[in-house]
Image (cartoon, grey):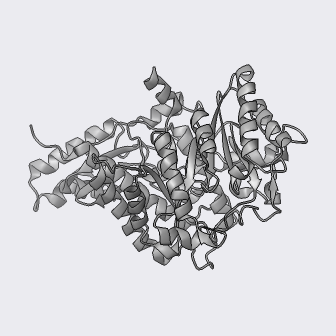
Amino acid sequence: MPGPMVHKYKFNNLNIVLDVNSGAVHVVSGLGWIIIDLMEKGHKEEEIQEKLNSNYDSREVIRVLQEIKELKERELLFSEDYTQDYSRPPEHIVKALCFHVAHDCNMTCSYCFAGKGAFGGIKSKMSREVAFKGIDFLIENSGSRKNCEIDFFGGEPLLNFSLVRETVEYARKREKEAGKEFNFTLTTNGVLLEKEVMDYLNEEGFSVVLSLDGRREINDRVRTLGGKGSYDYVVPKYLSFIEKREHKDYFIRGTYTRHNLDFSEDLKHLVNLGFKSISLEPVVASPELPYALQEEDLPITYQQYDKIADLCQQFSSTSKSFSFFHFNLDLSQGPCIKKRLSGCGAGTEYLALSPEGDLYPCHQFVGKQEFLMGNVLQDLCYDHSLYNKFLKVDINSKEDCRRCWAKFFCGGGCHANAYNFNSDLYRPYGLGCNLEKKRLECALGLQAYSYLD
Amino acid sequence: MEQRHIKTINLMDLKASLHKGGCGECQTSCQSACKTSCTVGNQICQKENNEQKK
C-alpha cells in the first residue's frame, strides 16, 4: 500500500513539490529539492547532513531539515495516506442525468464518438413521456440531494429544442413540491443557436458548452455540415450569445486530434476571437484511426500545454485573460476528498438517458447492452448490481491510480475510456492519464506563480 | 527575515474533508465541460460556494 508520496517537478524556473496525500503544494529552493529527493529515497537526516556537508553550508542544510520537520508535523509533507479504509457508501443516489434528447445530428463531424449522433443505433428523438419520466426518475432517486443536474446532450440537442423547453418547464414545476433545485446544461454544435434559443437559454440560467475546435481550417476539416465547415456559421452566433450572457457560465469546447498537434495555436485563436472560457479536449478514438493520438505524440502535446500555460500568464490581467478548463484549480480547498476519491460519478450519481428511455452509466456507455441499467418507461428503478459495480471502482481500487501522484486531482480517469481502450473499468486509459498529469503540472505551476506574485 | 527554503502555496485540508465533506451537492464533473476525460480537482465545492455567498 502506498504510504507518504510526493511528486517533484520543475515548472519553468520553479521547483515544485506536491505532497499527494495532504494536497499541499510547495515551491522549494535547489537545496530543498535535493534534500526532499534524498528523503524520498529513504535517507535519514544524519546521512543527508553527512552527504551534503562538503558541498553546502551546513547551517542551510540544517535549516532545510528543520523546515521539513515542521511540515511533516503539520502533515503537509510526507503525510500518510488516510483514505485506504474509506469506501463509498451504497447510498443509491442518482442526482445527475445526461438527457440524449436527439440521437441525430445536423453535422457530420468525422471524429464524433457518438457515431454522427446515433450512438451506433438508429436516429431518434426523445419523447415527452421519456423526458418527463427522466425528471421523475431523478426526483425519485436523488434522496436527500437538493441540487439535481440535467445536461441536454445528443447528437445535437437543439434538434429537439421544443422538448428541452417542455422538460425544463416540467422540472421547474416539480422541483418546488419535491424540494429540489434543477440546474441545466446544454451542449451544442451551435448550428441552431438562433436568437430565440439564445434568449431562452440565458433567461433559464443554462450553463452551455459550445463546440468549436479553433482555427477555421482546423475546425472545418472535421466539423462539417452540408459538405462545408461550420466555423463561419457558428462563430458569429457564439460571440453574440456570450456577449448577451455577459461571459457567464459557458465553455467553448474544442477537440484536438493528431491533425492539429499544434493546438495551442487553436487556443490562442479562440482567445483572440474574444472567448474567455475554453476547454480543449484530446480526441477519443480507436488507435488505428488516422486522427487518433498516439503515445509518440505525447512530447509535442506536453509542449503545447506548456505553451497554453505561458499564454495564461502572458494574458492574465489583460483584456485577453481567459480560463482553461483543465487548468482551473482551487488550491485553497476545492472538492472534498470523497469527491476526489470517487471521480466522475458515472454509474452511480450520474447516469445517461437514451431517447428510448434506457439508462446507462454515462453518455459514453449509451448503446452498450451489457451496461443497460433500466428503462424509465418501465419503472423508476435501476440495476443496483451495475450501480454497485461502479461504486467499487474508485482510486483505491485501481492499482495504477493508487500509486499515482495525480489521483486526488484527476479522480481516477474516465470509466468509458478505461472500458473502451482496456476492456477493464479498473485499468485507466494510459494516454489520457499522461495528458492529465501534464495538465495538472501546468495547473499547479500556474498557481505557484500566482502565489509568488 | 531569512528566506525560507520551502514555501507552501496552499493550505488544503483534504484530511478534514474526509469527515466533513461528502455532501454530494457539487456538480458532476462530466456535466461541466469535458464529456470525454475526467478532472475533479477543478470542480467547485458547493458547500463552500454557498458559505461564500452568505
- The answer to which image quadrant residue A148 occupies is top right
Say which residue appears at 71% left-offset and 26% top-offset.
Answer: A175
Residue B7, given in percent of the width and then of the height, sits at 24, 44
Q: Residue at 61% of width from left, 48% of height from top?
A: A194
In the rendered image, is residue A252 in sight? Answer: no
Q: Is residue A435 above or below residue B53?
A: below
Number of marks present in the image shown: 0
Q: Quadrant of the C terminus of chain A?
A: top left
Which quadrant holds residue A43?
bottom left
**Does A404 sit above or below residue A359?**
below
- Drawn side of residue A309 relative to residue A259, left or right: left
Q: Nearer the viewer, residue A263 or A442?
A: A263
Left or right: A137 in relation to A395: right
- x and y, in percent, of residue A434 in the image: 48, 64
Viewer-closest of A435 and A46 = A435
Residue at 67% over, 64% down: A107
- Residue A402 position, x and y percent, is 53, 54
- Front in this rendered view, residue A312 or A173: A173
A287 horizontally vs A451: left or right:
right
